[in-house]
Image (cartoon, rainbow, N blue to C red):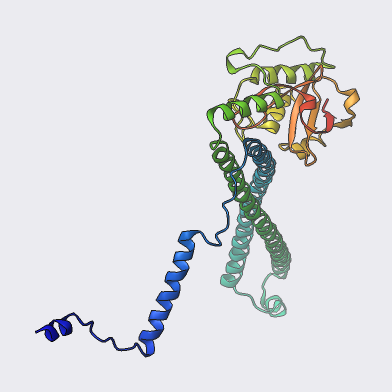
């Protein structure tokens, strides 16, 4: 009986694993060991420290600046796309007009050929010999010669028109390719702007409420603070503009104070930086190009020491920001998303140059 109990509690003998079963077991054992090591933290790389509030603010500023650079490139590509669109439309109209004239010439030639076919002709010498009225025959022959000259003229005209239409269509194809390239640039810059602005917002959302408020105060200080939308006339002072056009441009910019910054906007309810200066000078009857890097060449370059109200002032090495100088070291500009049009000191950003428009 005791022997029976001992046999009952004896563990069953296990057969050794062989072949693929052995390899599977070894793999599982190694995986388990690796997992155990990772759970215990042995050899794990330390987590990167979270960026400080100062680092977040600095990166946010860079992202906003990069977005403004992309905005000016977007504005330029959009202007070029509009020019290419007008060129394509004009060439299409020209091709249509030339094709209509070609069809008219072909119809005239066809009518002439049909008339000759129906009338039929004999050899001129035979017709003269058979004619009862040689004088009348010679008169008709002279007319036929003139008809032949007209036919030759029509043929030459048709060949010339076909050649012209071919050239017009070739130019239209080139402009169409140019338009497609500008539209691709637009999509690229639009994506870059939206991505950078979204990254900036996401980054700044990691700040505490107090840190975010401090960032906004610092950003306002860097961009001049300025009057609110509710008090656009605040900060307005008599400006001794050098001429009436400069005075009109400044008056327009004062009227825009408090309106929001929106990339790609040229008014009347929102502006980006070059959109504001373009609109201000347009109100004074002067047409400026669309972008900062083309506006800087729209007038006479002047040194900072000779700034006068109405001059355009540019910033950063890439000429990516512009404002309208109003005297006293101040300008009116559209700073960035979240910061409306305002008065700001010129020396708050890296000065890159100035241009006198009129």
User: Going by the picture, which residue comes out furthest to the top?
Assistant: 238
What percent of the width, then of the height, locates residue 319? 78, 38
Question: Between residues 107 and 93, which one lies in front from this camera angle?
Answer: 93
Q: Nearer the viewer, residue 23 or 193?
A: 23
Residue appearing at x 38%, y 87% in the figure: 20
- Residue occupying the point 65% across, 17% down: 255
Name the quadrant of the C terminus: top right
Q: Is residue 9 left or right of residue 236?
A: left
Question: How many numbered badges does the structure rendering display?
Answer: 0
Q: Is residue 236 visible?
A: yes
Q: Position of residue 110 (x, y in %)?
A: 59, 65
Identity of the residue furthest to the left in this view: 1
Q: What is the x, y in percent for residue 241?
A: 82, 15
Asked whether the viewer can see residue 287, the reply is: no
Quadrant placement of the N terminus: bottom left
Q: Residue at x 61, y 17 (%)?
A: 228
Q: Quadrant of residue 260?
A: top right
Indicate the position of residue 294 as horizontal and vertical percent values: 77, 39
Closest to the observer, 260 or 140: 260
Relative vertical location of residue 79 with respect to residue 254 in this rendering, above or below = below
Foreground residue among 301 and 298: 301
In the rendered image of this protein, does residue 87 appear above or below residue 315? below
Query: Where 279 sits versus 155, above or below?
Result: above
**Residue 13: which quarter of the image?**
bottom left
Q: Quadrant of residue 65?
A: top right
């Amino acid at each position: 009986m005791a022997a029976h109990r001992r046999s009952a509690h004896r563990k069953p003998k296990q057969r050794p694993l062989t072949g693929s079963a052995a390899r599977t077991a070894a793999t599982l054992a190694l995986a388990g060991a690796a997992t155990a090591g990772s759970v215990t933290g042995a050899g794990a790389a330390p987590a990167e420290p979270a960026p400080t509030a100062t680092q977040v603010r600095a990166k946010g500023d860079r992202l906003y600046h990069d977005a403004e650079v992309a905005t000016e490139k977007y504005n330029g590509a959009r202007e070029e796309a509009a020019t290419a669109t007008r060129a394509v439309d004009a060439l299409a109209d020209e091709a249509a007009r030339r094709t209509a004239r070609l069809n008219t010439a072909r119809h005239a030639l066809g009518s002439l050929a049909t008339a000759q076919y129906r009338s039929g002709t004999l050899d001129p010498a035979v017709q003269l010999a058979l004619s009862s009225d040689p004088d009348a025959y010679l008169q008709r022959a002279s007319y036929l010669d003139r008809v032949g000259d007209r036919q030759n003229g029509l043929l030459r005209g048709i060949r010339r028109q076909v050649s012209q239409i071919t050239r017009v269509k070739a130019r239209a194809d080139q402009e169409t390719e140019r338009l497609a390239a500008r539209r691709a640039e637009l999509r690229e810059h639009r994506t870059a702007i939206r991505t950078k602005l979204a990254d900036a917002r996401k980054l700044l959302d990691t700040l505490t409420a107090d840190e975010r408020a401090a960032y906004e105060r610092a950003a306002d200080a860097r961009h001049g603070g300025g009057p609110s939308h509710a008090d656009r006339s605040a900060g307005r002072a008599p400006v001794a503009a050098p001429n009436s056009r400069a005075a009109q441009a400044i008056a327009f910019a004062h009227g825009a104070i408090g309106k929001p910054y929106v990339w790609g906007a040229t008014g009347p309810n929102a502006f980006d930086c070059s959109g504001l200066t373009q609109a201000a000078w347009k109100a004074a009857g002067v047409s400026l190009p669309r972008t900062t890097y083309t506006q800087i060449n729209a007038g006479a370059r002047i040194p900072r020491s000779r700034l006068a109200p109405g001059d355009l002032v540019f910033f950063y090495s890439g000429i990516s920001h512009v404002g309208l100088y109003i005297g006293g070291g101040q300008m009116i500009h559209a700073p960035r998303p979240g910061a409306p049009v305002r008065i700001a000191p010129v020396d708050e950003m890296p000065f890159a140059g100035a241009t006198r428009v009129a």
